[in-house]
Image (cartoon, rainbow, N blue to C red):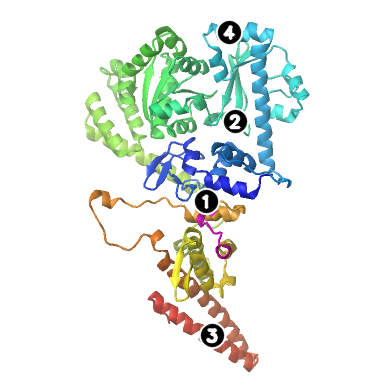
């Protein structure tokens, strides 16, 4: 097991922006980085990476964590694997202990096993291709006929599945792999027969290069058998969110700020071998928004390069509209008749291929107009249909400036009043928004449990009692005060503050001022944060936010990340020549922030204590002990004085 000290060394050394930057195209936004969330499909970036806090947070889906959590969530690693990966990246020597490792979560063990089985299959197919007579005579001969070099074959993990119906199954059992995993990954059938046989094999990797699935192409002509068969979806493979070749292409795409999308595996391989490396293909499925969002992590610019036949044109048009929906800048290029990217680049070579692409790539308006204008020019019905198709595409563009530019271009090219296009576009957008709003409301109705803010309590159903409304409002405000104190402890607990007793840490200052009411915390996680922050500060070990964002307690860690993450950045007024004389920023004003938070917190708690005490006094006054009554009245008056003092400090009037 890895020593705790080594784990902390790795987590403190790992730079979140470097780790996530290998997977997500991050752009600078003030002190933070922003990009499209890799955990859900989105069009507007809401995924924030904070280098100063060393955390990430998506304000769309809620995913958050540090570098190790990102690898665990995205790569399906367990904690130990994530730490070892980061240690290797940052050249940190890990110290091992003799303690028994904690048991992995069952789901992660399951996923680890699937990866191992896929790795075995990957090596098996390659070995069959390169080291057996059948593989060399059939599979390798096929790849060499296509002009693939040995380096290309290894780069893309090409292989061969022998004609035997049980050879892979028997080899996997001999290697001690479980039959249930072989079946789950689609490598064998229910009847224990090999799923892939007599085919050349293409391995499919995820963004980090892990083997997640396979595709097999039949050799020869067999009208009864499909040309390609693919692995079924599994816990490690979602074909709607995978692009073939993206692992090999991601660096070239980011560097060129431009991606080429093709249809076939061999298109990707041939183009890559010819030096056009920023190319990917959809993986055994029609193009999806999930796949396009993968591209958008690395670039906003896309060229769809499909065959020039009817099927290719139809697929290109569909892909173009999907690309507009995810806010890509799509262009379309169709190849000459009887050519696909594989054959065309082999025929004309690297330079001529790129020149053709440059000259023949068109934006969606020009493409649609060129495609249909010849027939539509003298036919009002066809022309109106063409205009409607163009407007439908324009309505999918989210950026208003970009949308306005395309409207102007369409007006000129189609010879129609710009106002008409604007009106029709807005009508489609409004209808789409209404549809999405209805879907969202329907989804919210299906949810259970309270998720709103304090204001939501005011608008609750009228059949709820006034008492319950008031109680919920009080709890919401108290929760806010507790949250505020925990936030300050995490963000500034290791800072130095000065009062009449001298210098002390913010954590010590807060704890010392609320210790008499800390037992009244409603949120035990926030309570624990304040206690631990104080204890670590007393020991001289407190590192501020990083202590909690790397905490071993998952609940504390997630809550800490939630508290310190923010989607906001400061306006750069000074860069515009505007200098404002204002109060300090919150992170520079922790002294006043701490004082105000303490007062607000104690004020709320004392009010609740007094309300409880008032009930006790009313009960005793009816038939209780007079001495006990005097004791409670004295305590109540003392609390009343303290409440009035705090109200004065807060500048509020109480009755």
Work out which residue is located at the far bottom of the displayed protein and give it: 626
Asked whether the residues under the numbered discs 3 and 2 touch, taking CB atoms below 8 Å apart as contact, a structural biologist would say no
Where on the picture, by quarter, is residue 616? Answer: bottom right
Where on the picture, by quarter, is residue 381? Answer: top left
- Residue 244 in magenta stretch: no
Q: Residues within 10 Å of mark 1 (few under 14, many from 20)?
A: few
Mark 4 to mark 3 CA distance (whole Å): 91 Å
- Could you tell which of marks 1 and 3 lies nearer the N-terminus? 1
Residue 272 is labelled as none
Mark 4 to mark 1 CA distance (whole Å): 57 Å
Residue 142 is labelled as 4
Q: Is residue 369 left or right of residue 113?
A: left
Relative depth, front residue between 261 and 209:
209
Q: Which residue in the protein does label 1 denote?
A: 445
At numbered mark 1, what does the secondary structure look like: helix, strand or loop? helix
- Could you tell which of marks 3 and 2 lies nearer the N-terminus? 2
Q: Where's residue 13, x and y in %?
A: 53, 45
Relative depth, front residue between 11 and 306:
11
At numbered mark 4, what does the secondary structure look like: helix, strand or loop? helix
Asked whether the residues under the numbered discs 2 and 4 touch, taking CB atoms below 8 Å apart as contact, a structural biologist would say no
Which residue: 26% across, 58% down? 580
- Residue 539 in magenta stretch: yes
Let me know if residue 219 appears in the view.
Answer: no
- Could you tell which of marks 1 and 2 lies nearer the N-terminus? 2
Q: Which residue in the protein does label 2 denote?
A: 237
Q: Residues within 10 Å of mark 2 (few under 14, many from 20)?
A: some
- Magenta part of the chain: 537-546
- Could you tell which of marks 2 and 4 lies nearer the N-terminus? 4
Mark 3 to mark 2 CA distance (whole Å): 64 Å
Q: Which residue in the protein does label 3 denote?
A: 636
């Amino acid at each position: 097991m890895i020593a705790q000290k080594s784990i902390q060394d790795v987590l403190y050394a790992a730079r979140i922006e470097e780790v996530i930057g290998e997977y997500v195209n991050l752009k600078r936004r003030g002190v933070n980085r922003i990009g499209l969330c890799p955990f859900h499909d989105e069009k507007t970036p809401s995924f924030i990476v904070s280098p100063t806090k060393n955390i990430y947070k998506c304000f769309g889906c809620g995913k958050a964590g540090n570098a190790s959590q990102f690898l665990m969530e995205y790569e399906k690693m367990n904690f130990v694997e994530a730490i070892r990966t980061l240690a290797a990246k940052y050249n940190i020597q890990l110290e091992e202990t003799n303690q028994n490792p904690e048991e992995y979560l069952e789901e992660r063990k399951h996923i680890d096993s699937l990866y191992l089985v896929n790795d075995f299959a990957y090596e098996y197919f390659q070995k069959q291709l390169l080291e057996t007579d059948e593989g060399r005579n059939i599979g390798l001969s096929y790849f060499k006929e296509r002009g693939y070099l040995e380096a290309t074959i290894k780069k893309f993990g090409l292989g061969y599945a022998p004609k035997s119906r049980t050879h892979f199954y028997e080899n996997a059992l001999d290697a001690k792999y479980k039959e249930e995993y072989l079946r789950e990954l689609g490598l064998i059938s229910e009847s224990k027969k090999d799923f892939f046989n007599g085919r050349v094999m293409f391995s499919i990797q995820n963004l980090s290069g892990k083997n997640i699935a396979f595709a097999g192409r039949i050799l020869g002509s067999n009208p009864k058998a499909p040309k390609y068969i693919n692995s079924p979806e599994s816990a490690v493979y979602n074909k709607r969110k995978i692009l073939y070749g993206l692992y090999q292409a991601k660096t070239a795409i980011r560097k060129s700020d431009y991606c080429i999308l093709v249809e076939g595996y061999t298109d990707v391989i041939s183009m890559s071998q010819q030096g056009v490396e920023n190319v990917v293909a959809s993986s055994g499925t029609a193009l999806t928004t999930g796949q396009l969002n993968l591209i958008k992590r690395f670039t906003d610019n896309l060229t769809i390069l499909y065959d020039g036949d009817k099927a290719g044109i139809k697929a290109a048009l569909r892909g173009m509209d999907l690309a507009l929906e995810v806010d890509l800048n799509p262009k379309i290029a169709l190849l000459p008749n009887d050519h696909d990217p594989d054959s065309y680049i082999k025929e004309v070579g690297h330079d001529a291929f790129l020149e053709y692409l440059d000259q023949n790539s068109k934006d969606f308006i020009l493409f649609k107009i060129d495609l249909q204008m010849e027939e539509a020019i003298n036919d009002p019905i066809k022309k109106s249909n063409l205009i409607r198709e163009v407007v439908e595409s324009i309505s999918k563009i989210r950026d208003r400036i970009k949308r306005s530019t395309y409207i102007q271009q369409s007006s000129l090219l189609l010879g129609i009043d710009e106002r008409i296009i604007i009106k029709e576009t807005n009508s489609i957008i409004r209808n789409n928004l209404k549809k999405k709003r209805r879907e969202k409301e329907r989804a919210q109705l299906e949810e259970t449990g309270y998720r709103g803010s304090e204001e939501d309590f005011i608008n609750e159903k009228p059949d709820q009692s006034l008492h319950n409304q008031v109680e919920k409002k009080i709890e919401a405000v108290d929760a806010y005060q507790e949250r505020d104190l925990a936030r300050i402890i995490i963000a500034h607990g290791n800072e130095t503050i000065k009062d009449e007793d001298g210098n002390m840490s913010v954590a010590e200052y807060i704890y010392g001022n609320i210790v008499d009411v800390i037992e009244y915390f409603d949120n035990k996680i926030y309570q624990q944060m304040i206690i631990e922050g104080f204890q670590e500060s007393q020991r001289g070990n407190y590192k501020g936010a990083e202590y909690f964002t790397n905490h071993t307690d998952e609940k504390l860690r997630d809550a800490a990340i939630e508290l310190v993450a923010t989607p906001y950045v400061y306006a750069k007024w000074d860069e515009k020549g505007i200098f404002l004389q204002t109060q300090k920023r919150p992170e520079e004003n922790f002294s006043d922030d701490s004082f105000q938070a303490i007062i607000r917190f104690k004020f709320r708690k004392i009010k609740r204590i007094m309300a409880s005490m008032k009930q006790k006094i009313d009960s005793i006054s009816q038939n209780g002990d007079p001495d006990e009554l005097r004791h409670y009245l004295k305590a109540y008056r003392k609390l009343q004085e303290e409440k009035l003092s705090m109200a004065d400090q807060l500048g509020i009037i109480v009755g």
